[in-house]
Image: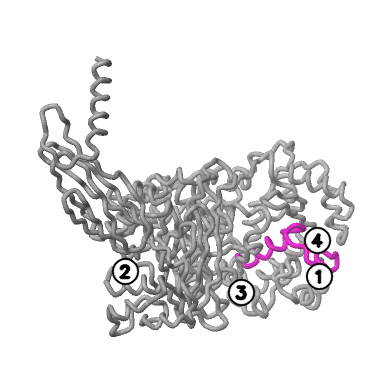
Amino acid sequence: MKRIFKKIGVFCLCLSLSTVALAQNTLTDNMLPIILAPGAQTIPSVERTLSYNINANVDFEVSTTADWLTVTRNGNRITINVQANYGGDERSAEITFSNAEKDINRVFTLTQSKDDTASEAPSADHAEYAIFGDKVYSTLREGVTEEDLAKLTNPFIKSLATQLYNGTYKTDYRVADYKCYLAPPVLAARWNTVGKQYNQYEGATGINIPKGKHAVIVSGIPEGESATLRVCAWYVGKVGTNFDGGDPQTTNYQLVNGVNIIDYKNSWDGLAYVCYYTLDNPAQKPAIRVHFVNGEVNGYLSPDKTNKEMHELCKNAKNYCMDAVGELVHSVWTSEGFYKYCKATDGTQGYRQFMNILDSLVQWEHDLLGFGKYGLLETPQNRTFAYVNFTYYMFQGALGVSFHRDQEPRVLNCRTIMTRDDDAIWGLSHEWGHQHQMHPYLCWSGLGEVSNNIFSYYNIMHMGYNSSDKINDWPRARRLFFEDAETKDGKKVSSSRGFAYNNAKSNASLFSYSPKMRDLCLAMKDSVVTSYASNPLRAVALHDATPYQTSVGYVLNSFIMLGNYAKIHLQKPGAAEGTKYLDFYPDLFESLRRMGYEGGSDLEKQDGWDKYELIFHAQYATHDDGYKLLKEKFPTSCWITDRYVDGQYRGDGENIVPAMLNFIRKASRLYGYNLFPYFERHGYLRNVALYINDYSWGYYVMTMEMYNEFKADMDALVADGTLKEMPEGMVYDMMYCEDLNNRSTGVTRYPTPEIPN
């Protein structure tokens, strides 16, 4: 059989060669039917006419579905008239030669390159630009005729004008207005979250930028303001399991009014963003208009589109990734991931619901921060950011929140994240929580991975969950700090105390400005942790490390129960009987934000500077006159006499105690109770020295003088009627307060919400 097949193959080849010059001959019994036509060809973007001789020994029909070319036939000679490709994309057409009777189909694929004249656009003073009717050349002036077009000599202008005249130029995504936003660093400074920046890619365009030159036409940038085109390749062909170079690559181009020629040299396509930021009053700045002439339309997802429309955008995406621009969150995921996995809770396409979920998470964080209550949101409102990465599971970096691509099946599925995966909600909220941490006000050393989880907890509660791995730590935290169950033998040793000792021993300059602080470090030689019953001052501290492995959940417990007790049980000071203190954390965050006011925060007090505000400012240099005012107003304070602060910036790398005491003081005033006993049981108030590892190293050093003075100052607030003493059992009730959604009691204060799609 093999030999027979070989003979047939040779016969066919010979027949093909022998019939190349034949016209339409009558078939004989020993001849095979054949049509010889070109297979494929690529031509430039300009208008042209092509001719081909088609050799065949059968009659044939010629057809095409493309509307940008016409095919005519004269015998076996085929003429193809191709229109100029004025669009920004390469295009292909199939021309089919067929004989139905003999079941023969030959396909000729003709590919026409995209118009590249945009890369040679003339400067804005070129006289022929007068043919356009607007400053970004997206319309023609009234009354333009074919004769006017024929007179044009510049290829770029003629190409664009011809498309506009013919009605073939689609301006969707290519031409758009872009709002001005407050610069993210300025916003962070207003929120006391310096270094934690919101979206740096506002102005999603839906335009994909491949390698090469691109014409971008701009109008409306006000004098004194600037706008930047950021082209980001979110995917750069690097997939791994760690931070190994697969981060997104962003190229920035300064935009000017008029014609901008962008030379994008990255090998990986990038999505374009018109970043238009200002230092103040963004609502008073006019929008700018931008026209991308030859970029590729990728589109972006937004709530004003239907789920079906967004599904098609993902299906036909030019870029590996796709933007989703909600009201509060801008996110970037893979186009394929969106297309495959973005399902609503009912199993239908869920793009709108997904964006609403992300917006809800950030809205709940804003509510907890008191942004709405205290009018801290700008108009237009800056978004936060989430994006897909290809190297690491989950992290918060300089750009925002990021999940590995492998997590898209769970993160993009609305049913999963709303009802089946508290970790996804916790993770998103945790990372955004980093952007909301107020360093060092409520993010001193030891809280880097803790205080952001205040937002995570409240968000999983709002989503209807009643459990998480952190909640599972509450009982162990209570056994450690309240029940004194793990320290009774007096043999536990704290590595944090040991590090403080070793550092002081090896470094004579450590705390050299304050001998008592240095002496306390040297007193940590044995590093023994006592039981609370035997010596509360040397009992386990909040930031003690090994042997207790004081995890995130352990440390977080005190913050969560402080907020939960206020919501569930605390009578709000000064409010009508039965009014619970639902706004404790919004008020606390606002009090911390107001510390920079002249006279300090006026939210929880009306009598000007508090001593511990000034100690905080003196420690962290967050107010120019902090140390000076502290010395003038409180000259006999041990913080002055023992030089625990001395007017030199020390930062939290030296001592976090001022931040902790300031926090306790403000929380107490807002509660209306002296919370000293609550925080003492939770390990905040210990006569020890600790060296804490939290991204950067920091110290906790509380001398007896600090402890005694703070206790006396808190007692004084009770004596003058500012605060009430905590009644018997209140510390217990606070530490053992139930969760907002409680597994043991079945009380659900936040059922799973209805989030629209």
The residue that label 3 is drawn on is 594
Q: CA distance from mark 1 to mark 3?
A: 22 Å
Quick one: 516 or 485, which is closer to the camera?
Answer: 516
The residue that label 1 is drawn on is 647
Q: Which image quarter: residue 46?
A: bottom left
In the image, what residue occupies the spot 64% across and 56% down?
679
Quick one: 597 or 494, which is closer to the camera?
Answer: 597
Q: Indicate which label's residue lies in the foreground, 2 or 3.
A: 2
- At which x and y percent is residue 436? 55, 62
Disc 2 to disc 3: CB gap under 8 Å: no
Q: Secondary structure at mark 2?
A: loop
Q: Which residues are magenta?
A: 640-667
Upstream in the sequence, badge 1 or badge 3? 3
Residue 738 visible in the current orientation: no
Upstream in the sequence, badge 2 or badge 3? 2
Disc 1 to disc 3: CB gap under 8 Å: no
Q: Indicate which label's residue lies in the foreground, 2 or 1.
A: 2
Q: CA distance from mark 4 to mark 3?
A: 28 Å
Q: Which mark is residue 169?
A: 2
Q: Which mark is residue 705?
A: 4
- Identified by mark 1, the residue type is Gly
Image position of 349 with respect to 630: above or below: above
- Identified by mark 3, the residue type is Arg
Q: Which mark is residue 359?
A: none
Number of marks present in the image shown? 4
